[in-house]
């Protein structure tokens, strides 16, 4: 089966611009998660979708971040306007069951805001 | 916010040596997981632990879920060059993972 796919793999944007990250989960996985790793720090939870519904967005840093999952398939994470501190690697993951059985992560999108 | 203390931060070892790393928390978790991240890739699940005291092996890897449910360790035996990477522990409560800061492992041939 195809894994979790993220696009783009790298993005360099200027402060104040908008960037949209995309995640295609494993087919049939209802649960989709976004995480972020800022340089040298731990990987932190951003939010969790079950199908198209946001179950938990407690980790979203602020209202410049907007995640969507229309139709319960792929998801997008938009940062608008981007700030320098948004730089990091954004990981998407998916799982079939809601639980702690281990997700499958994508390769991540490395975002650099200059 | 909640943190997991993962140590060591980095390790340089000779090929063939054994490696040990651990994670501790001030809070209890229902599940502990260990992931490995290679450069340019996402974390890949190595071992998942579901019960306090559980000891699980996956090839040369062995991990344990601490009795107190607040810690876990990962051992790698007879390291090889492809063991290079960043190892992350994660404590899980249902769907949400709390990750450690990672242990960067370098293996010298």
Image: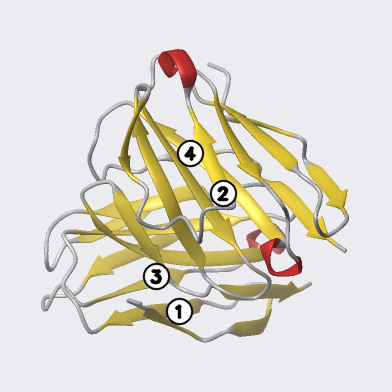
Tell me the quarter of the picture where residue B30 sits: bottom left
Position of A105 relative to B14 (above/below): above
User: On the image, numbered disc 2 is attached to which residue?
Assistant: A65
Spatial CA span between label 3 and label 4: 23 Å
Q: Which of the colour schemes (rainbow, by chain, secondary structure, one colour) is used? A: secondary structure
Of the residues under marks 3 and 1, which one precedes in the sequence?
1
Question: Could you tell me if the residues under marks 3 and 1 are in contact, i.e. CB atoms within 8 Å?
Answer: yes
Between disc 1 and disc 4, the foreground one is 4
Label 1 element class: strand
What x and y, as percent, mark residue B87? Answer: 53, 66
User: On the image, numbered disc 3 is attached to which residue?
Assistant: B74
* Residue positioned 55% across, 51% down in the render: B43
What x and y, as percent, mark residue B64? Answer: 26, 68
Spatial CA span between label 1 and label 4: 27 Å
- Residues at marks 3 and 1 on the same chain: yes
Of the residues under marks 4 and 2, which one precedes in the sequence?
2
Q: Is residue A69 visible?
A: yes
Between disc 4 and disc 2, the foreground one is 2
Spatial CA span between label 3 and label 1: 6 Å
Spatial CA span between label 2 and label 1: 38 Å
Quick one: label 2, few (<14), some, or many (20+) residues within 10 Å? Answer: some
Q: Which mark is residue B20?
A: 1
Q: Which mark is residue A93?
A: 4
Spatial CA span between label 2 and label 3: 35 Å
Q: Chain of mark 2?
A: A
């Amino acid at each position: 089966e195809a894994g979790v796919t993220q696009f783009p793999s790298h993005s360099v944007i200027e402060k104040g611009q908008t960037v949209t990250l995309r995640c295609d989960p494993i087919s049939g996985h209802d649960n989709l998660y976004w995480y972020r790793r800022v340089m040298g720090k731990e990987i932190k939870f951003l939010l969790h979708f079950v199908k198209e519904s946001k179950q938990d967005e407690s980790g979203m840093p602020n209202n410049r971040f907007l995640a969507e999952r229309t139709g319960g398939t792929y998801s997008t994470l938009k940062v608008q306007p981007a700030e320098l501190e948004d730089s990091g690697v954004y990981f998407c993951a998916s799982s079939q069951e809601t639980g702690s059985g281990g997700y499958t992560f994508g390769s991540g999108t490395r975002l650099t805001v200059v | 916010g909640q943190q997991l203390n993962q140590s060591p931060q980095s390790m340089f070892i000779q090929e063939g040596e054994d490696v040990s790393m651990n994670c501790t928390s001030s809070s209890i978790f229902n599940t502990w997981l260990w992931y490995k991240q290679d450069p340019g890739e996402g974390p890949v699940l190595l071992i998942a632990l579901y019960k306090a005291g559980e000891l699980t092996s996956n090839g040369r890897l062995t991990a344990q879920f601490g009795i107190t449910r607040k810690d876990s360790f990962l051992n790698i035996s007879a390291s090889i060059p492809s063991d290079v990477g960043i190892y992350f522990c994660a404590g899980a409560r249902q769907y949400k993972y709390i990750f450690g800061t990672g242990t960067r492992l370098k293996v010298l041939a």
